[in-house]
């Protein structure tokens, strides 16, 4: 460390106002003598901040003396539960369970010690009691010096990101003492929407697993939990208005459901970490489980001229369907505070609709001919109108756009299909039509293969498509998806982490941060840090962590 | 259950003396009316026993009254620690933590209750204080009736397998009461060697993880833990005679080593479950970590005419090498009680040997020309002589056979290379030369892919090669291998289970047990049973267990 010298990373910061996909100056890192440095010369920062100035000057941190404080003039004080909660969390991360230092009575002889991190929220409204949103300001500036380090952020959301960075800068010296180097960081996310999708329908995920993953998301500066809560297999969401949905449609009505209190807990736990919770209630396909608790909601399939006893997608020709949806999404709009709800709309199988004579008659009346995608659009259109009336924005899977449904311009189109060329073409089409979009195709982390497949996730970039600057500005980010067919509490966390960390850096850091061998060095350390913090993230390759996972 | 009627599975038992690979009568299951039944009509027995007679007659089991007892005339009594230990384990598995039943005072009105399982060890030497071996008798007969069930086995090893089967027959009725049906089971393993390889060198595996996996192995009737304890990456085995090997060659000399006490604990924990511990100390390749603690053991590599500072395989031309090996394997022969030690011998890279002028001179002296496999054989030959002098048998990877090393006829050749056609040809060659062999190629479970890859493992069969009956008799079994490059405590257990269960059934059950959809139904239940017993086995597909895993 002593020989490292002072580092300066620049380029990105000057262009903070430019959209994430627009190319800018080289984001490489240089020392004061003009030598190009690798990102891993920094401590194991993950995702890499936009700008870091480091130096070899190190300070100590004492568990018995160090404090997080609210800076004078900060718009947040000790009544700001988000910050107070984060202070406790990061104190634990930094000092572990060794609250009592041996050096409690004597100061470091050298006297170089960071005694506090002053947190200053600089805008008048810190948003301590708010929810994070697509437009939340997550920027921060961190200056580590003695005796006081200073973290400045316009809002608490940036302060949360800065606290994570601060904790990542702390390292143990050979004697186990906590050290931190004189450092300056200016940071902000490249993309506003950085999400992880978990699927609680294919397998029920105990609350413990969801909370642990929110914890891990915060360590990776993710800010959206996309909760794919229902699907064909089960409906675990306990609706106050339609309790039969989970009573009859969950794997078990008491042990495999999310009660209103559970949902509240997830949302608040996420809010404390600057993470939005966007619920997805996917319709009209992927709804088999809804049918058990809501009569006539699904389309009866026919064999010849009589009902076969099986059911297809939501029945789009009955008024009762829309009455139900209006009631249901009104509830959802109050339960989930986020401004967006994800309405799904993917993979609608037309075979059941085709078999049903009432549907056929309706198709004729509407003049849809044999084009069932028109019927799908008919349904989605009415659903969007219903959801709009609850003052929510919506996200939809790409098929809704592909099928030509008329969408409000604030709709977010979620791209998930195809190979690289296909998803890039889709990103071009969606943004060409003026819609904002986010990418998931290369980040279906449920798909596994032998070896270091995090590299592929790391290499993908949501801006790699042919389009104008104006189009690129419409890319709001992406999501790592862990569909639930083959994961549950037994294997979810190590399968997701640190593979989702690769996506996290792609979505947070400068577009120019792409050196895979440098990323490897930092990610190995970041993974060990997650393990040390209790997240059983799997190893990237051979080796060991000083603190190994102690579970089974 | 009531409509199931009495079932009878036959065929296999009559041919118990015939080697596992030789085809025999159809092992299908029939009821008394001649209807063919699926295996899954039995309870979730895994691996499926050779012969099961079931009936709809059910009995209750009460936690407050049920006992395991030593049958009159059994050669094992309450001083048999293997059985006493197993009784406690299976009592817990069967009754969970609800030791006190509500029905403690009143008997079931119907009076049909199994009050005890009498365990009778029928041969004069129960082997209570012995170690399991390649020739251990693991057969057992189980008769479940009221008021007493009876488990007969020649040795404790069969009793352990029978206790597992007994515990698998117990099910909960709708009221949570424990039930078991009138059942007869005659069972024995198809193969004598049914192993799991874990690699504690690429990543150190905490003792807890090894013990948990021994526990899971017993649930699947595995009987060999192949401990690939050292490799290039680290040498965690603490040698009494050569302590520097781990002191300098482990990831950390205190936190990432197996002490003599640790090794003893693993061996005893395994013995209690009828599992052999076969240690592998792989040489002459895969030995980088040995070089740190044993001077001159590895071959110095050269660049041109001077040493490059790097090292290759074990140096086969120095007498000190063989002195070391003699001392080392003498220790190993006393530390590991099993009659076999695995000597490795795979993947020797000749480039370093080729670069070294002393090696070249030695090659000339020996008349090896440029054939470095002759040098490899020279080394292996001397190593085998050393190990033979310790009265141990040895297992080797297939290369040792492929390179024409002269082997004792009791050598076990471990096949691991190639595609299906290639490993089948190798099995034919090895057995054609009269050697016993075991298969691992299709069971490299470290290799993962998306979806239900347990099916491929399940479909493979070690007897599928062209050869005579005499050759087939030389197949002693196989091993599921979980190489450690990408697994450690964070993800090992769910990655291995229940995929290794598929291999377990292939190695235990009748060759005719191959119905994949039937296996699916039973394996789903078996996996949930493992989860309930504390093993985080991953899910096969969508769905749920009544008792979900509660970890993260």
Image (tube, coloured by chain):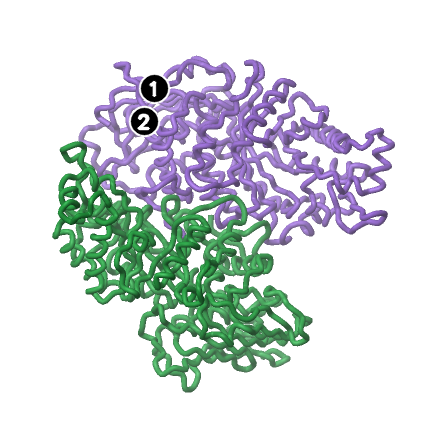
Chain colours: A green, B purple
From the top left corner, tell me how far across and down residue B252 is, in percent. Answer: 63, 54
Graded by Cα atoms within 10 Å as few (under 14), some (14 to 19) or many (20 or more), the crowding at tag 2 reads some
Asked whether, in this view, residue A130 is left or right of residue A241, the answer is right
Residue A351 picture quarter: top left
* Pointer 2 with pointer 1, Cβ within 8 A: yes
Q: Which residue is mark 1?
A: B29
Asked whether, in this view, residue B356 is left or right of residue B114, the answer is right
At mark 1, the secondary structure is strand
Q: Which residue is mark 2?
A: B42
Q: Residue at x 68, y 49 (%)?
A: B249
Asked whether, in this view, residue B162 is left or right of residue B423, the answer is left
Residue A273 picture quarter: bottom left
Q: Let me know if residue A493 appears in the view.
A: no
A335 or B496: nearer the viewer = A335
From the top left corner, tell me how far across and down residue A4 is, in percent. Answer: 66, 71
Mark 2 and mark 1: span between their CA atoms?
10 Å
């Amino acid at each position: 460390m002593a020989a490292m010298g002072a580092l300066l990373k620049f380029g990105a910061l000057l262009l903070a106002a430019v959209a994430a996909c627009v190319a800018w100056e080289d984001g490489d890192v240089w020392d004061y003598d003009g030598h190009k440095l690798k990102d891993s010369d920094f401590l194991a920062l993950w995702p890499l901040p936009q700008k870091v100035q480091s130096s070899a000057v190190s300070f100590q941190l004492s568990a018995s003396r160090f404090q997080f404080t609210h800076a004078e003039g900060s718009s947040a004080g000790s009544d700001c539960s988000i910050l107070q909660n984060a202070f406790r969390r990061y104190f634990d991360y930094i000092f572990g369970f060794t609250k009592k230092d041996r050096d409690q009575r004597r100061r470091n002889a050298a006297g170089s010690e960071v005694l506090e991190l002053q947190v200053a929220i600089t805008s008048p409204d810190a948003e301590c009691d708010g929810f994070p949103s697509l437009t939340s300001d997550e920027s921060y500036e961190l200056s580590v010096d003695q005796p006081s380090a200073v973290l400045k952020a316009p809002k608490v959301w940036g302060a949360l990101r800065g606290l994570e960075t601060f904790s990542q800068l702390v390292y143990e010296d050979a004697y186990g003492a906590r050290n931190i180097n004189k450092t300056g960081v200016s940071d902000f996310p490249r993309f506003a929407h950085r999400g992880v999708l978990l699927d609680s329908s294919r397998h029920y995920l105990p609350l413990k697993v969801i909370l642990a993953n929110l914890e891990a998301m915060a360590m990776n500066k993710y800010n959206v939990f996309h909760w794919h809560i229902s699907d064909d297999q089960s409906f675990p969401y306990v609706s106050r208005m339609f309790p039969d949905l989970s009573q009859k449609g969950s794997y078990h009505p008491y042990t495999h459901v999310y009660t209103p209190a559970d949902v509240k807990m997830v949302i608040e736990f996420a809010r404390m970490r600057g993470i939005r919770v966007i619920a997805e209630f996917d319709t009209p396909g992927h709804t088999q489980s809804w049918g058990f608790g809501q009569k006539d909601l699904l389309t009866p399939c026919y064999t010849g001229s009589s009902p076969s006893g099986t059911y297809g997608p939501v029945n789009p020709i009955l008024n009762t369907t829309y009455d139900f949806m209006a009631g249901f999404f009104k509830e959802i709009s109050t339960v989930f505070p986020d401004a967006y709800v994800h309405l799904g709309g993917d993979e609608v199988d037309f075979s059941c609709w085709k078999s049903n004579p009432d549907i056929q008659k309706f198709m004729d009346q509407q003049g849809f001919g044999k084009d069932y995608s028109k019927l799908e659009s008919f349904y989605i259109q009415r659903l969007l109108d219903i959801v709009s009336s609850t003052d929510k924005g919506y996200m939809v899977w790409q098929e809704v756009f592909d099928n030509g449904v008329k969408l409000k311009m604030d709709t977010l189109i979620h791209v998930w299909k195809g190979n690289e060329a296909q998803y890039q073409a889709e990103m071009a089409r969606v943004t060409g039509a003026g819609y904002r979009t986010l990418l998931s195709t290369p980040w279906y982390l449920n798909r596994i293969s032998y070896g270091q497949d995090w590299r592929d996730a790391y290499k993908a970039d949501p801006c790699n498509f042919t389009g104008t600057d104006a189009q690129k500005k419409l890319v709001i980010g992406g999501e790592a998806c862990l569909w639930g067919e083959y994961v549950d509490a037994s294997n979810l966390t190590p399968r997701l982490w640190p593979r989702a960390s690769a996506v996290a850096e792609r979505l947070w850091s400068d577009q120019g941060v792409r050196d895979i061998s440098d990323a490897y060095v930092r990610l190995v350390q970041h993974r060990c840090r997650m393990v040390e913090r209790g997240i059983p993230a799997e190893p990237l390759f051979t080796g060991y962590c000083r603190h190994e996972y102690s579970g089974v």
